[in-house]
Image (tube, rainbow, N blue to C red):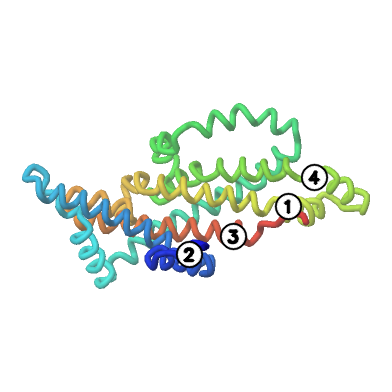
Amino acid sequence: MMKSTTLPPSVAFGHLGIKKFKAMPAWSHNLLYATLGMLMLLAVWWFGGWLIASNPDTATFAGFGPGPAFAALYELVASGSIWQTIWSSLYRILIGLFWAIVIGVPVGVLIGYYAVARQVANMPFQFLRMISPLAWMPIAVLVFASWDNAIIFLITIAAVWPIIFGTAHGVQRIDPLWFKVAHNLGADGTQMLTRVIMPAIAQDVFAGIRLAVGVAWVVLVPAEYLGVTSGLGYAINDARDTLDYDKLAAIVIVIGIIGFMLDSIGAKLIKMYSWKME
C-alpha cells in the first residue's frame, strides 16, 4: 500500500501562507519588510531608553526614549513651531544644492568628455574632495557677510563632488558611436549636449544628486551650529544647552523623516530616468 502524502495541518497551513505571501503584489512585500524593519528599530530604541531611564546615573537623559520623544514631537507639530525650523534648513539645503548642480554638472560634463581635462583635474579634485566640508568653516565665516551664506557655501562644497564625479562617470559611459552618428547627422556642440549627452547621463546625474543630498543633509546640522538662530541644527544645539532631551530626540526624528523623504525623491528620479537597451 502507498503511504499517505497528506501534510500535517500546521505544515499545510504554513505552505498555504507562504504561497499567499508570494502571490501578494511587490509593493505589499516592500511595505511589510519596511514595517518590520522600523518595528525592530523602535524596539531597540525602546530598550535603550528603558536602560537609560532605569539607571540612576543616566536617568536625567530619559527624555531620549521613544515615549518622551514622540510626545515632544506632537507638541512641536501641534504648536506649529517646527515648521519655520524645517523651512530654514530646507531653504539652505535647496540653495546649496542648486549651486552644487549649477557648478557640478557642467564641470562633470567637461572632465568626462575631454580626457585632457579629466587628467589635469583628477588629482586636485580628489585632494579637495577629501577635505571635510566643515574644515572650510573658518574661511566661509571670513568670506561671507551673513551666516546663511556661509552655511550655504559649506553645503555647496559638500554636495558638489558627488555631482561632478557622477556626471563625469555618466559621460564616460556613453557609447562613442553615438557621438559619431550625431556628427554624421550634422549635430553642432549645443545639439550634441542637449540631444545626446544630457539624455544619456540623466540617470547618473540624479544618482550623483541623490548622494549629494545625503552628504549635504549630514553636513547641515553641524553647519547650523554657527551663528544662525534658526534651523534644525540650531534647534538641536538649543535643546542640548537647555537640557531639553525629549525635544532634542524629537528634532532628530524630524531630521530622519525629512532626510528619508529627500532620498526617496532622488531614488524616484533615478528610476524615472533609468533605461536599458533591449
User: Secondary structure under badge 3?
Assistant: helix
Could you tell which of marks 3 and 1 lies nearer the N-terminus? 1
Amino acid under label 4? Asp
Q: Which residue is mark 1?
A: 200
Discs 2/1, front: 2
Q: Quadrant of residue 251?
A: bottom left
Which quadrant holds residue 92?
bottom left
Whether residue 145 can be seen here = no
| Amino acid bearing label 1 | Ala
Compared to residue 173, the image places residue 268 above or below, namely: below
Q: Earlier in the sequence, mark 4 or mark 2?
A: 2
Closest to the observer: 84 or 265? 265
Residue beneath label 2, please?
4
Q: Horizontal and vertical percent for residue 107?
A: 66, 42
Q: Position of residue 153 (x, y in %)?
A: 47, 45
Q: Residues within 10 Å of mark 4 (few under 14, many from 20)?
A: few
